[in-house]
Amino acid sequence: MKVTSLLVVTAAALQSACASDGAIAPAAPALALSAEGNPPPPRVLGRFATTFNTSPGQFGAAQQYVFRGQAYFNRNLTSGMNFFEMATGPGRIRADAAGVVVASGIVVLVDAGTGAQVSFDLSQLVGYSGPLFGSCPPGSPVNCLVFNATLSGMVQPVGGSAVPATGHLQFRWDTN
């Protein structure tokens, strides 16, 4: 009860302090800080999927593994800076329209179907120039982006030895 009363009194005091010439100042900013295709601040949790393909010769033929995980994404609409951060474990990327500014952390994911693991070092993106994040293919959810860069990693099949593989990452924040 005391907390509720205190909040009401504080809100009333702030409201009267913001009044000018008897009019109440608007509570929300005049300009919306969001744009279509961008998540609203603060960062939002979403799903990403990576498809890694081993090179032919490792198993006699190329093999494909699909890895999924969760990450946070946000875009500062003022600076145009993109922020991507793994939800579990290390892994962070900061990129602007000119390329990757900072990237660090080794990401390890598991293929749900085979139990294989992939590991890739995000620092390989350091020095990448051009927009890192692009639009998803037609028919994808609106709130979806893909890495324009190809990632290199190592796939460790269950009971087998690790083999080099390459893949792309797709992120969507319309489902959690």
Image (cartoon, rainbow, N blue to C red):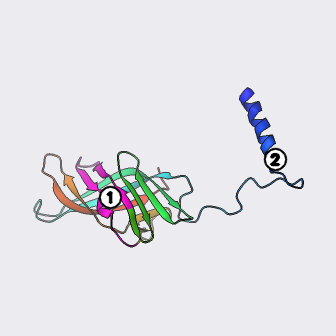
- Rendered location of residue 58, percent (x, y): 12, 60
What residue lies at 77% left-to-right and 36% top-to-bottom? 8
Q: What residue would you read off at disc 2?
A: 17
Left/right placement of residue 11 relative to residue 85 reads right
Q: What residue would you read off at disc 1?
A: 50
Highlighted range, magenta: 102-130
The answer to whether residue 57 is seen in the rendering is yes
Q: Residues within 10 Å of mark 1 (few under 14, many from 20)?
A: many
- Rendered location of residue 94, percent (x, y): 42, 60
The answer to whether residue 1 is seen in the rendering is no
Above or below: residue 17 compared with residue 100: above
Above or below: residue 63 compared with residue 5: below
Q: Amino acid at mark 2?
A: Ala
Q: Amino acid at mark 1?
A: Thr
Real-space Cα separation, disc 1 to disc 2, in angstroms: 52 Å
Q: Secondary structure at mark 1?
A: strand
Q: Of 131 and 118, which appears nearest the observer?
A: 131
Examine the structure image and report whether residue 163 is included in the region drawn in magenta.
Answer: no
- Rendered location of residue 75, percent (x, y): 51, 61
Q: Residue furthest right?
A: 22
Q: Residues within 10 Å of mark 2 (few under 14, many from 20)?
A: few
Q: Secondary structure at mark 2?
A: helix
What residue lies at 80% left-to-right and 54% top-to-bottom? 25
Q: Of 101 and 59, which appears nearest the observer?
A: 101
Q: Of 83 and 113, which appears nearest the observer?
A: 83
Going from the N terminus, do you reach mark 1 or mark 2 first? 2
Question: Which callout, 1 or 2, points to the residue nearer the camera?
Answer: 2
What residue lies at 26% left-to-right and 60% top-to-bottom? 52
